[in-house]
Image (cartoon, helix red, strand yellow):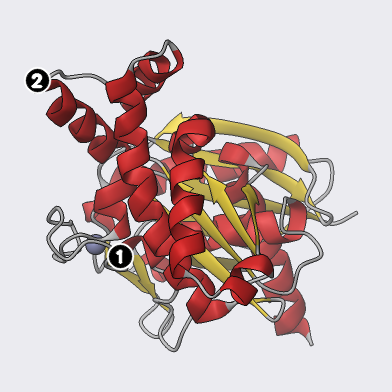
Amino acid sequence: MSLYAGFDLGGTHLKYGIVNEIGKILFKEKAISPPSIEDLLLLIKKLWEDIKKKSEEDVKAVGFGFPGIFSLIEHKTLQSPNYPSLDNFDLFPALSRSIEVPFWVDNDANMAAYGEFKAGAGQGVQSMVLLTIGTGVGSGIILEGKLWQGKCGFAGELGHIIVNPDGEKCLCEGQGCLETEVSAPKIVKNYNVQKNSKMDISAEEVFSRAKKGDKDAQKAFAQSGYYLGIGLASTINFLNPEKILLGGGVISAWDYFLPPALEEVQKRAYKASFECCTIEKAILGNDAGLTGCALWAKEQLAEAEK
Ligand SMILES: [Zn+2]
């Protein structure tokens, strides 16, 4: 069976591994993401050498998922709020000095959606959306069995649809984006507003308090759930997808987050479109990105060889 490698770059970790052609991970590991692009390239070179030593067969192609707006025209990440040293960096010549097999680069959230579509909870559907809710909100869209990239590669940024015109300022320079209203920092902020405090705690801690019966913690999730519902209703009305998959750390609090979201979706989406769509948890977790990267490289290689 042919093998493919995936590298999924996040703000804190670079997750990487070897995946077979049906999406089974044969090896995976993670390394700390170095902040500078030069160190990142050195790390990728070293890890790629390790991968080749580990795999019993040749790895045929490599996929990279990088955070930020990746241009299919310029072959560069134009803007990466979470990894600024990628901005406008000429990636392809630099990567081709280390990677001697065919490789492809795309946005990390697109790759995670592709991973869930090919090897996770989206298998067998023709249209789906993955929303990953953590420190930010990533998303990718599959339409008619294909990743929807848009003309220049920037499609699927549902984290930056406006759900609250008077909401928080966003790193994208917008205001009240889905990302600013539902991600982990906002849940902590909601909780602090409820408590009239300035606690420096994590969203995990707010979740743990919610489970212990802290009504303010439960409300912090419900407030974000309301905006998630608005975002989901727009997504459903706009795309009529077969499935919406929700992933990311914040989704651990499903019981506090989802009921208010679904209540809002039911109010705002076309009933027929809502009933046509299944909303469920993504299943690949942190492996979605590297799996998607590897399987994307597999598909692109097959296209290139046609
Ligand atoms: Zn935004």
Which quadrant of the figure has residue 279?
bottom right
N-terminal-most mark, 1 or 2: 1
Please say whether residue 183 is visible from this viewpoint: no
Quick one: 247 or 27, which is closer to the camera?
247
Q: Give the percent coordinates (x, y) of residue 36.
A: 25, 45
- Amino acid at pointer 2: Ser
Quick one: 233 or 138, which is closer to the camera?
233
Q: How many marks?
A: 2
How far is the residue under mark 1 from the one under mark 2? 28 Å
Q: Which mark is residue 197?
A: 2
Can you tell me whether the CB of the residue at mark 1 lies under 8 Å from the nearest atom of ligand 1?
A: yes
Quick one: 110 or 246, which is closer to the camera?
246
Front tag of 1 and 2: 2
- Amino acid at pointer 1: His
Which quadrant of the figure has residue 175?
bottom left
Looking at the image, residue 132 lies above or below residue 252: below
Q: Is residue 118 left or right of residue 209?
A: right
| Placement of the N terminus among the 4 image quadrants | bottom right
Which quadrant of the figure has residue 54?
top right
Residue tagged by mark 1? 160
